[in-house]
Image (tube, rainbow, N blue to C red):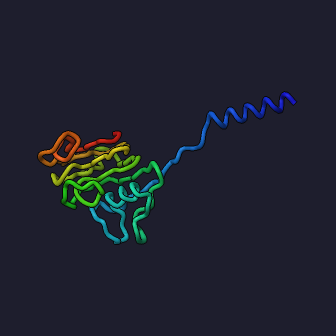
Amino acid sequence: MRKTAAAALVGVAVAVACGAPAALGATIGVTTAADAVAVDGAGSLREAITAANLDTAAPGAGECAAGAGADRIVLGPGLFALARAGAGEDLNATGDLDVRGPLTISGAGADRTAIDARGLDRVLWVGPGAALALEDLTVTGGAAPAGGAPGADGAGGGGVLSVGEL
């Protein structure tokens, strides 16, 4: 009886120590270097970030899969140049790429994958409560808009402005 009770307590202790499994998130592939938001059968980096932010798939076949918690976006080799002008909005529609949740963006190597803002805006904005990890890629061509208080548009952070965790 004592061995059974002891074994049961060890099992409970292991279960408590391990806790519930963490949400691993989704892996979201990007299939075009174009900075597009369209039902065109291809998934852009901007669409992938929106899918991760909202945990919702982009509509249409061939578009980005839904995010699911702490997501990973995978970029192949190439130049991912931002083209949707419009600084000062934080919903990922124009300008910089706006991250609003836990996200990792992985490239194919810093010398093979680049995200270029082409001077339109910052490259990335990491919002409050969000977390971003960048792996094996180059961030370039960002410009912070003029004016503003620290942490607001116009502050530092031409490459990445993070009011979350970077």
Res. 135 visible in picture: no
User: In this rendering, does residue 105 appear at all?
Assistant: yes
Which image quarter is the C terminus in? top left
**x%, y% of residue 16?**
64, 35
Foreground of the two, 148 or 97: 148
Q: Quadrant of residue 51?
A: bottom left
Q: Is residue 96 above or below residue 18?
A: below
Q: Position of residue 126 (x, y in %)?
A: 31, 46
Which sits in the foreground, 78 or 40?
Answer: 40
Q: Where residue 125 appears, x then y in whole percent?
A: 28, 48
Q: Residue at x 37, y 44 (%)?
A: 129
User: Quadrant where the N terminus lies?
Assistant: top right
State the residue lying farthest toward the right: 1
Residue 18 sits in quarter:
top right
Residue 161 vs 97, above or below: the answer is above
Extreme-left residue of the structure: 146
Q: Is residue 149 above or below residue 10?
A: below
Name the foreground residue: 23 vs 65: 23
| Residue for point 35% across, 48% down | 107
**How many callouts does the rendering have?**
0
Side of 133 where 8 appears, left or right:
right
Q: Is residue 89 left or right of residue 18?
A: left
- State the image coordinates of residue 122 (x, y, percent, origin top left): 21, 49
Residue at x-position 33% and y-position 50%: 99
